Image (tube, helix red, strand yellow):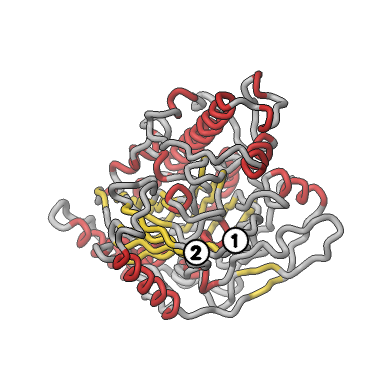
Amino acid sequence: MSRMSPAKRRVGSRRSASPASAGLFWLLAGSLLGACAEPKEPAARPPNVVLVLVDTLRADRLPFHGGPPETAPFLARLAERSVVFENAWSPSSWTLPATVSILTSVHPFQHGVTDLVGLEPEPGDEPQPVNCIPPQIETLAEVLAAHGYSTYGIASNLLVGEAVGFDRGFDRFVQLADEPADRVNAQVDSWLEEMRKSEPFFLYLHYFDPHDTFHTREPWFDPPASAKPRGWPDISRPSRDDHFHGDIDWILTRVGSLPADLRGKRAVDMTTEELDRLLEWMRAAYDSEIGYVDDRIGRLFDELGLEDAVVVFLSDHGEEFYEHGDLTHGQNLYAETVRVPLLVHLPGGIRAGRVRAPVSTLDVVPTLRRLLGLPPADQDQGLDLFAASAGRAVHGILEGKSGQHPLEDDMRSIVVNDRRLIEWSGGRVELFDVADDPWERDDLASALPAAVSELRRQLAVMESSAPRFPRTRCDPPPIDDALRDRLKAIGYLGEGSD
């Protein structure tokens, strides 16, 4: 079943687009270029803005982050005429808190949308209010709607919907039930004529495809191309204990066509060689999903004529394949789950390059404010991406019961330049040099106690200085048996976290 929210129409009149706003955009764009090129003449209207989010997409699987070139050829070409942020970090390793933060520039520990209560009912449960975006927080759609933009949103994720408040500020918003990229693009096609008549528009696209359940998308499914030495790190598979067997058996319920000799087997019955082949198959299926969604994003880019739009491309979080002893995501804050791709395409590709300084996905909203000439907001915790500089601190959080897996401790992380600290509420810390050790294998905490102390101090300052918004509960969404079955199928009920 596809749960689709009705079209949303704002009450009241939209402000007309301001030519001064458009002129300021081009002034800013020109200043970003330096002497590389002359800015265009001021446009008659502000540019269209498109935010493309691909769920569960690791940065290191994309060509412009060192992944195989055949994995995402369209995005590789887009990156060549965009600004790529090499060290972009998500504030969480699962969708709900991470996506709220992207669309509000507010940390998870501030907005408080960090649990699934009300979104995960079991049969017979009484409906419960849902943890939703506080009304005091303005979303990106609300910001742009207030400044003359028509607003459209499509989210193919069962958590990103009106129950949590993601539809706020959108003229039209549709939530799809983990459907593939073709369905997302078809929805855009149905709005195409309307969108072209209502420019400037803001379009939010949330693709789901790399998230499990794993499919083998042809012609992109190619296990040899996805195997080492094409960029995957070694797997730190744990000992064959109940936890490991349970992880594998759960994943086996969430895959498509396995090799014939692995079908019907349980993890406890597999040899080490068979388990290695299973993990290789999973990684190849994951890569094939990336290839598929890359192709569909490319088609939509051409269809909408987005070369003269501001396009932001990113992910909410990554995915783990046993690099640190777990599968999927939402269970730790290691790089494979919180280091994400991020690029910004300016109209006409007027600036291209790479930024090495650490940035956060919270930086998207303040960057768009500045590019479009909109006033800054006290709410914003991120910074302008184009002002990224050395010494910037980037913060992350994972609360112990935020997803479906109860964790032993809450986790916090902070990145400053190349050093990254992960701290557990139980007192354990790890320190990594993410330039020399991108897979975070060599814990430097015991060797560099002064660095640990300084990063812990900065982490405490960041958390103590940011205001908290009141935790907000909204009405529970209607969930029927068909949708409940779908939630179970993709792991939102009883297994895993999004």
Asked whether the viewer can see residue 22, the reply is: no
Task: State the SS at label 2.
Answer: strand
Seen in the picture, residue 471 relative to 404 is either above or below; the reply is below
Please name the residue shown 67% across and 34% down the image: 252
Which residue occupies the extreme left position in the image? 35
Residue nearest the observer in this picture, 169 or 200: 169
Which residue position is annotated with label 1? 408
Which residue position is annotated with label 2? 424
Seen in the picture, residue 355 relative to 214 is either above or below; the reply is below
Please name the residue shown 37% across and 64% down the image: 394
Q: Are marks 2 and 1 in contact (CB under 8 Å)?
A: yes
Instruction: Point out residue 442 in the picture as x, y percentages from the top left corner.
Output: 36, 49
Side of 264 where 13 appears, left or right: left
Give the residue type that dot 1 points to.
Answer: Glu
Task: State the SS at label 1.
Answer: loop
Residue nearest the observer in this picture, 333 or 207: 333
Please name the residue shown 44% across and 75% down the image: 463
* Quadrant assignment, res 380: bottom left
Instruction: Point out residue 232 in the picture as x, y percentages from the top left corner.
Output: 42, 35
Residue nearest the observer in this picture, 488 or 416: 416
- Marks 2 and 1, how far apart in space? 9 Å
Instruction: Point out residue 468 in the picture as x, y percentages from the top left corner.
Output: 52, 79
Which residue occupies the extreme front position in the image? 446
Q: Quadrant of the N terminus?
A: top right
